[in-house]
Image: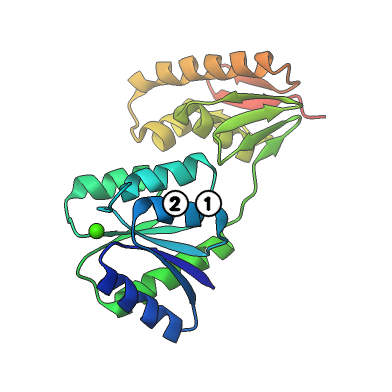
Amino acid sequence: MNILIVEDETGLAEAIGAILRREGYQTDIANDGQMGLQLALIGNYDCILLDIMLPKMNGLDVLSYLRVKEIETPVLLLTARSETEDKIKGLDCGADDYLTKPFSMGELLARIRAMTRRKVITPDINPRYGDITLDIKKGEILCGAGSVVLGRKEFQMMEMLISNAGQIVTKEQFVTKIWGSNDESEYNNVEVYISFLRKKLSMLHSTVQIKTRRGIGYCLDGAK
Ligand code: CA
């Protein structure tokens, strides 16, 4: 297994590298953000350990760039700062986990094992129904050669409709799962988002339709 260490404290980078190699991992070390990015773009790594405060390019920028380029290698952020803001920013940018310095090597190894295991077992199956497919990574709905980006809530609703294909999904189920409430005043939101989804399906000329079951909810129709 191949691990990239991006860390400007050379002593720490070397120490991590030595321990990982002793555990049977192969390692590369970059001491600044630019070099880290270059290596991450060309190398075939199973995991990247990424410091946040780095010369030339900071870790969060490196991470965002990798995710834009659709490089999905698991990233463990190493941060000297314990502020929640950095952690949240990092997770928003697509980090898989973070570790606050100083950390024990035992903890680091445990996180690496968990991250690389997760990568192997994560199913990468895009939900399908009729002529449409949901692209989980891109948050898009695909039909034939066309595609449309869905908003977060639209995507979640479409996912629920597809996973319950053949059954009715009630407004209450949408509100509970997506808005996290059971307030009937949210039911209007459901109608609004359903109308967005219908427009997008017709833009794609899909044969799939979202049928209204009056007073109950919605279901998909149009699979051949
Ligand atoms: Ca640093």
* 18 vs 62: above or below: below
Horizontal side of 158 relative to 146 (left or right) equals left
Residue drawn 53% across and 42% down?
A: 69
Query: 180 or 58: which is nearer to us?
Result: 58
Can see residue 164?
A: no
Do callouts 2 and 1 mark residues in contact (Cβ within 8 Å)?
Answer: yes
Helix, strand or loop at mark 1? helix
Q: Residues within 10 Å of mark 2 (few under 14, many from 20)?
A: many
Q: Quadrant of ligand 1?
A: bottom left
Left or right: 118, with 179 as reference point: right
Q: Amino acid at mark 2?
A: Leu
- In this picture, is 42 found above or below 118? above
Quarter of the figure with the C terminus: top right
Identity, as a three-letter code, of the amino acid under mark 1: Leu
Q: Where residue 23 appears, x then y in whole percent?
A: 44, 84
Q: Position of residue 53 (x, y in %)?
A: 25, 53
Where does residue 93 sit, x and y in percent of width and height?
Answer: 38, 43
Q: Tell me the residue at 37%/22% (across/down).
A: 186
Residue drawn at x 56%, y 36% is 138
| Residue 57: image location, x then y, percent | 33, 46
Q: Dividing the picture into quarters, in which one does residue 64 lie? A: top left
The answer to whether mark 1 is within 8 Å of ligand 1 is no
Viewer-nearest residue: 84 or 68: 68
- Say which residue label 1 marks: 41
Q: Residues within 10 Å of mark 1 (few under 14, many from 20)?
A: some
Badge 2 marks a residue whose secondary structure is: helix
Write down the quadrant of residue 79 in the picture.
bottom left
- Quarter holding the N terminus is bottom right
Q: Mark 2 highlights which residue? A: 37
Residue 19 - label: none
